[in-house]
Image (cartoon, rainbow, N blue to C red):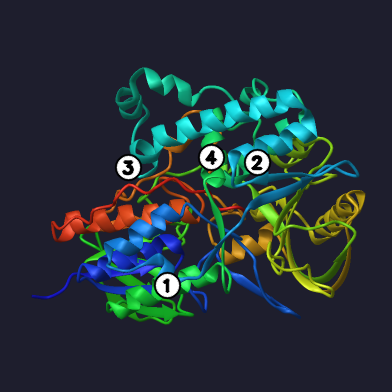
Amino acid sequence: MKADRVVIVGAGMGGLAAALELAHCGCAVTVVEAAAAPGGKMRRVDTDLGPVDAGPTVFTMRGIFDALFETVGESLDAAVSLTPLAVLARHAWGKGPSLDLYADVERSADAIGSFAGAAGARGYRRFAADSHRIFDLLDARFMQAPRPSMIGLASGLGLSGLTIRPFETLWRALASYFEDPRLHQLFGRYATYCGSSPFMAPATLMLVAHAEQAGVWTIRGGMQGLARAVAGLAAARGAQFRYGTAVESIVVENGTARGVRLAGGETIAADAVIWNGDAGALWRGLAGPAVARATPATDPQTRSLSAVTWCLAAKAEGFPLAFHNVFFSADYRAEFDAIMARGRLPDRPTVYLCAQDRSEEGPPPTGPERLFCLVNAPPAADTGRPADEEIARCEATMMDCLRDAGLSLEITSRTVTGPRDFARLFPGTGGALYGTATHGAMASFRRPGSRTAIPRLYLAGGSVHPGPGVPMAAISGRLAARTVTEDLISRPVSIPTAMPGGMSTR
């Protein structure tokens, strides 16, 4: 019996998860990827000291990946080497004291109590309990369900649906837990994990805090090791990977997707096509006019955050860096007003810094080390913003922010990536890194699901349901695989509910 042929465009985590499950089911899978390696946004950038993770920097929500690997008869622990982190992140506000959050709730509460007093610790315990409850309510019913509706979700949750707080902003909700503005800022930052502003995102995104609280791991060899592991398992089951190969268009015959045409003119025929690029690239015509109606048009004003990133080799002195560090600006509202309302880089940005050679077991490096720095930016690449001069000014103010906390960097090599670069790497996004922003109660329900308006053309990745981040993209790939098997061979892939884990930290 001839195997069903599936072409997957893009080897990001959504495409990889779909490729593994479909190949395991016996489909003839071909993955076409323009980059030289798998991973999508889990990319690496070379420095003088070796490659740096230049996208997601931690592994979280491991239950999703345990379930993925178990479905195909494999073990996650056998495929990648994971190290749990006790310190989730170290947070700093200028020259004042820093605050560590831990994988243990009570240890975090004790640290917050020492930092902000007993009221802060009590507020954190309530926040942790509420974010846990929201996560549990939405895990199976929303995140791992095929494109749910607000009405269906509300019906399924009943009165408990009121506790997910969809009509209240995260920033406003946090005021009921924290009086200290620094804690308000710290927990508001979780909205940025979805590329959103805490002043516009719903309080439902509290669940992200629990997701991270439930566990964060590093992967030996970096995050791309996870992508290579999934790709390797798919290849062992017969999936073919064609790297360095761009897709010119999706072939449509008699209104149905029938394959892809490559930039060199070759056509790969298929019974189904999964698009693992940004969903917005389709309606912008970047996969050919025949599929421009496959997804609804999206307003550029709804795009998620972009970023400016620095991959550095540098000697760091003066501040005791953990693996993950956040250096907050003094005025969070001004920062997001600049990005969201005025479309420019903030005068004083909050800086995320991942010290990728630091561990909790050994001493800190005595010489140069690999660092990844990120500041949020507007997704305005198609307007030419931000210009190189604006990025240079942002780098200067970023360094000021680090120096204010006592950190000095002696840089020996740097690679800077801005929104215009991300727009080239991920076409159709304008530089946005998380699909559409999660602003307002209905935003999560406006993301497209696995199916499109073109029969046999499917979607996966962070721009579709259930949303951005490595774990969510993996779920989207599993949902796409299940939809393909339902439509083609009536052998749906089961998707076991994952144990709670953590969102990918950007």
Q: Are marks 1 and 3 in contact (CB under 8 Å)?
A: no
- Is label 1 or label 3 in front? 1
Q: Nearer the viewer, residue 11 or 25?
A: 25
> Which of pointers 3 and 4 lies earlier in the amino acid sequence?
3
- Is label 2 or label 4 in front? 2
At 79% from the left and 43% from the top, the residue drawn is 328
Q: Which residue is mark 4?
A: 210
Q: Which residue is mark 3?
A: 145
**Please, what is the three-letter code of the amino acid marked with disc 1?**
Ala
> Which of pointers 1 and 3 lies earlier in the amino acid sequence?
1
Q: Which mark is residue 405?
A: none
- Is label 3 or label 4 in front? 4
Q: Is residue 209 above or below residue 281?
A: above
Could you tell me which secondary element the residue under label 4 belongs to?
helix
Q: Which residue is mark 2?
A: 107
Q: Which residue is mark 1?
A: 79
Q: Residue furthest left?
A: 1
- Is label 1 or label 2 in front? 2
**Please, what is the three-letter code of the amino acid marked with disc 2?**
Arg
> Which of pointers 1 and 2 lies earlier in the amino acid sequence?
1
Residue 140, x across and y down, in percent? 34, 40
Q: Are marks 2 and 3 in contact (CB under 8 Å)?
A: no
Residue 475, x across and y down, in percent? 38, 52
> Which of pointers 1 and 4 lies earlier in the amino acid sequence?
1
> Which of pointers 2 and 3 lies earlier in the amino acid sequence?
2
Report whether 30 appears left or right of 190: left
At 55% from the left and 65% from the top, the residue drawn is 42
**Please, what is the three-letter code of the amino acid marked with disc 3?**
Ala
**Please, what is the three-letter code of the amino acid marked with disc 4?**
His
Could you tell me which secondary element the residue under label 1 belongs to?
helix
Disc 2 to disc 3, C-alpha distance: 34 Å
Could you tell me which secondary element the residue under label 2 belongs to?
helix
